[in-house]
Amino acid sequence: MTTADSSVLDDDDDPADRLGQAAGPTYISIHGMEQLRTEHTELLRRERPKIVRDVADAAAMGDRSENAEYIYGKRRLREIDRRLLFLEARLRQLVVVQPSEQRDHTRCAFGATITAADASGQCRTWTLVGPDEIDIAAGLISYKSPVGAALLGKQVDDDVRVQTPAGVRNYTIVSIEFG
């Protein structure tokens, strides 16, 4: 590997810097951390060895230049290795936060489940999670997202104005719960 090879993370590389994100800690729940560790373990212990065997078998068939199984296997192996490097760097960067350990349960913070009403009275419920745990359909939004960032520090009955790509949204916080 040359020093000009920027596709590989060094121990000193911060994935946030490579992705153009702000430096500083990135929070994650215990559940989210377990999911990332499980993905890392699956890739390292199950998926990668299987692909290595497949590539070795395909290479044994002869001409590699026109061997689709070999070419696809090598490509998949590179994808797995990139993902493993990303996960290893990401796992070192993340800070696990327990929602129940938040000191002030009257304000929106990481791990809080917030119900807010818009101007028409329609309620939306979100749980503030880390960027690695987002699931919009399940109501899990990043505390770094426009809505999440606007909610941080707010209390019940506070009005929140959120600039979204679809325009400005106004909400009133109805409830805050920590599970």
Image (spheres, rainbow, N blue to C red):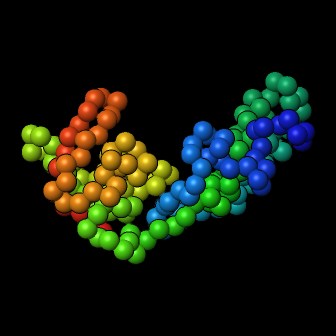
Q: Nearer the viewer, residue 166 or 37?
A: 166
From this viewpoint, is residue 166 visible? yes
Give the quarter of the figure containing the N terminus: top right
Question: x, y (%) of residue 75?
Answer: 73, 36
Query: Looking at the rendering, which quadrant does residue 45 occupy?
Result: bottom right
Q: As drawn, which residue projects farthest toward the top?
A: 66
Residue 113 vs residue 71: left or right?
left
Q: Quadrant of the C terminus?
A: bottom left
Going by the image, does 136 lie left or right of 10? left
Q: Which residue is at a point 65% across and 47% down the rendered structure image?
A: 15
| In the foreground, 142 or 161 | 161
Question: Seen in the image, is 128 located left or right of residue 69?
Answer: left
Residue placed at 77% from the left, 32% from the top?
71
- Give whichever of 174, 64 is nearer the camera: 174
Q: Is residue 47 visible?
A: no
- The image shows residue 120, relative to residue 50, as above or below, that is above
- Image position, residue 81 (x, y; %): 73, 47
Q: Residue 43 or 36: which is nearer the viewer?
A: 36
